[in-house]
Image (cartoon, rainbow, N blue to C red):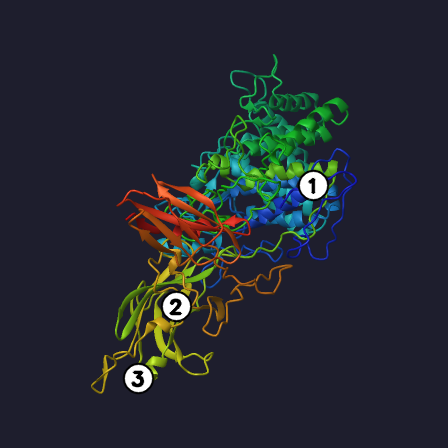
Amino acid sequence: MVFKKITAAVSALVLTAGMATALPKNASVPMVKANAASAYNYAEALQKSMFFYEVQQSGKLPEWNNVQWRGDSMVNEDGEETDFVKGGWFDAGDHFKFTLTNAYSAAMMGWGYIEYKDAVDKAGMGELYRNNLKWGLDYVMACDQGNGKMVGTIGDFEGGSTDHNIWCSAEVYLRKHHLNGGDWERPYDIIENASVAGISAAALAEGYLIFKDSDPTTAAQYLKHAKDLFAGADKIRDTKDRGGMGSMYPTSTWLDDCMYAALWLYKATGDTSYLKKVENEYIPNFPTESQSTNWKYSWGLCWDDTTQAAALLYAQITGKQEWVNHIDKHIRYWMGEADSNIKKFEGNITSDGLSHLTNWGSLRHATNTAWIAKLASDTIFKDDSAKVKKYNDWAESQMNYCLGDNDLGLCYVLGMGDKNPIAIHHRTASGIHDDHWNSLGQSSGGDEGWQTEYAHTLYGALIGGPDSQGNYDIEKIGVGQYEYTEVAIDYNAGYTAALCAMIDDHGGKPLSNFPAQETPKWAEWEVAAVLNGKGNSYTEIKAWAMNHTAWPARVAKDIEYRYYFDASEIFDAGLTIDDIKVEGKSQQYQAGQQGYATVTGPYVYAGDKSGNTLYASIKFEDGRAIQPTGQSEHRDEVQFRISIPDAVNGKPTTGAWDPTNDWSYKGGIATATDLKKADSLNQQMPMYVNGVHVWGTEPDGTKATKSDYTFTRGNGTVTPQPDPTPSVTYPTNIKVAYSEQYHQMRFTWDKVDGADKYGIAVYLAGKWRIQTSNITTNSYTSPKNMTPGMSYKVAIAARVNGKWDTVNAIKNAVKVTVK
């Protein structure tokens, strides 16, 4: 989605096509008046940040979740949510749930709404914002186990089958967990950690302030838990009990979180004992700079350091000048204004203006401090116009840097701007079905043709960011470089709060038709087949039924595919349907296991009135074993044979068996080489899921036109998705003719509908190298006088609608040897 700039006179452009808005039902889309200096539609940015938090939802999704490609997750085969604490947000591009980051994110988001509620509500996003915030708060509250003890981590955090070793979508993750461990419940731990309990208390106290008028019952529960958690945290006063989160979130301080929580409880209750505790116990022990008595002003606001958040909140509450000065020093430190009282910024300020603290989530740190600067400008500095302008300008420069105001012209907020990073560390957004994620975002999937394209646009997610020099090479940075490609709920938290302030200053308008409806980029269900054996009286097939679902990822119990064959020559020879035998041979699963298929037939195809077309049915007793979670799980191999007797009543049946006129055989069986290659995909072996024809074409021309899944939540549509079986976008039936006289080759292939160009690539020295990409016919002749005996792997790609399908071209590559 191009991120539209707006001015005071021109409102943001909106999408004209797509599914229903993600705003609440019956909500209008008001326009908050934009100031003349406004550069971006910050309301759109906030709307998309809410979308990201909806993507991160775990468990059974609420009716208001409008992410079409997300479904319920962490549920067993009976549809029951099995996590010890249900709901909550997944932490990042994985499937862990950490109470620490859920609470921290909710606390930052809640603060933004408390301070700028009127602006968010006026922009028409109040209910959307509150819905998302409440989702996180409810989870945090449910993690409270009493006396400061909390559920710390839910997820596979130990043993060989850890979360980070599994790459699949959230909807099917628990199936992989079950496959590896045999159970349907993810591990969890209960920890006594003052940092976790403290930030949770703060978030819930904010929740009380936000919901006390609209939902007093829930608000009262938030406040009760906030008080209890704070009391427990204040007694624990230690952060060493980290449990499963320890290697990823090694909490190191507690005083900052407890001070922050006490101040919010003071604001929520008016009870001065909380303020006195801050002044008598926490401030005397407030962190100081190394080898100094000065209060700590360096580093920055994040999940493990809420020092500056607590300091700003105390300055707001009391107005004490020394704390106002402290926040002033902190912001100037981030701006690089070192002097005798302020040490040099320990990160680097790039040539295009980013205050870069660390490579791990550099934009997360910059936008968190932008939030501090924005709020301070509107509160404790509001009477100093010069300071307000200076700090506001700096804060907005950090926010706008994320949105594309940088030397690279790169928008680090996904789904916005003209250019985004292309390698994103997020499992569900990728739609990976075979656990091979290393090629995501790369120009080539290598010799094996691994998936490079993401299934989904992860709208609104703030990605990690550039290095300390402002560099971010989107062509070279891979998914595995987490410090740059990670997205996370805490990355978006301070950024989201700052957007609330930006809307207050500049206005903006949420998109009226967001999110746009996605249609599958590839076939979600497929059948591949090769010839496994043949004779004068039989044909044996080896086939894969494949589940590549991602809209959303899912499994199905009822799966069947069919092999159609023409029996006219059999009947002409005097045989009957009773003489034809259909039988299963070897297969991937054993009888009694999910994934075992029953091979039956022959059956008469109703679409052929002559009665000559029959079919074999390959129907899985429970197809849920075919799941998009790994290289062996995403497909189910079955071998089957169709045959007639060699003789009937002593008379040979020679000539009565001819597979070449069989509908499914003509789908590519004669030329298919390998089940892993695209040439084995057989669109004349139709597939049916839950009774819906989802793949291939029947002999009478009936094509798959529906999906087995219909999005129905909230404002969703009941209309089935468009045909999930895409037209072929790569050359097939590649043939090679050799010239021994000139030592050259001529390639021909079937024309691809809609192709305006073809290209040739050769695999040399471990890389695919383009030879030409300007072929306008379906043939190509190599140069003369090539070296006899040399072998090459050649891929032929087509350009359709301006896009090259290199993945399938590589999968369909041919090996040639010069003669």
Q: Nearer the viewer, residue 63 or 104?
A: 63
Residue at the image position 44 percent from the left and 65 percent from the top: 683
Instruction: Give the numbered dot on residue 666.
Output: 2
Q: Nearer the viewer, residue 296 or 454?
A: 454
Q: Is residue 227 in sight in this rendering?
A: no
Q: Nearer the viewer, residue 541 or 798?
A: 798
Residue 332: image x %, image y %? 64, 21
In three-dimensional space, the C-alpha distance between marks 3 and 1, rounded to whole angstroms, equals 75 Å
Residue on which the image places disc 1: 41
Q: Image check: 470 left or right of 113?
A: left
In three-dimensional space, the C-alpha distance between marks 2 and 1, rounded to whole angstroms, equals 54 Å
- Judge whether 801 appears above or below 350 on screen: below
Query: Is the C-beta separation of discs 3 and 1 under 8 Å?
Result: no
Residue at the image position 75 percent from the left and 38 percent from the top: 7
User: Which three-letter amino acid code belongs to the residue tagged 3?
Assistant: Ala
Q: Is residue 346 in sight in this rendering?
A: yes
In three-dimensional space, the C-alpha distance between marks 3 and 2, rounded to whole angstroms, equals 22 Å
- Judge whether 447 appears above or below 577 on screen: above
Q: Residues within 10 Å of mark 1 (few under 14, many from 20)?
A: many
Q: Nearer the viewer, residue 613 or 594?
A: 613
Query: Is the C-beta separation of discs 2 and 1 under 8 Å?
Result: no
User: Which three-letter amino acid code belongs to the residue tagged 2?
Assistant: Lys
> Label 1's element?
loop
Residue on which the image places disc 3: 573
User: Would you identify the image quadrant in which residue 439 lies?
Assistant: top left
Query: Between disc 3 and disc 1, whose residue precedes?
Result: 1
Seen from this angle, which residue lies furthest left? 650
Q: Residues within 10 Å of mark 2 (few under 14, many from 20)?
A: some
Query: Between disc 2 and disc 1, whose residue precedes?
Result: 1
Instruction: Give the numbered dot on residue 696.
Output: none
Residue 335: image x %, image y %? 62, 23
- Judge whether 362 appears above or below 45 on screen: above
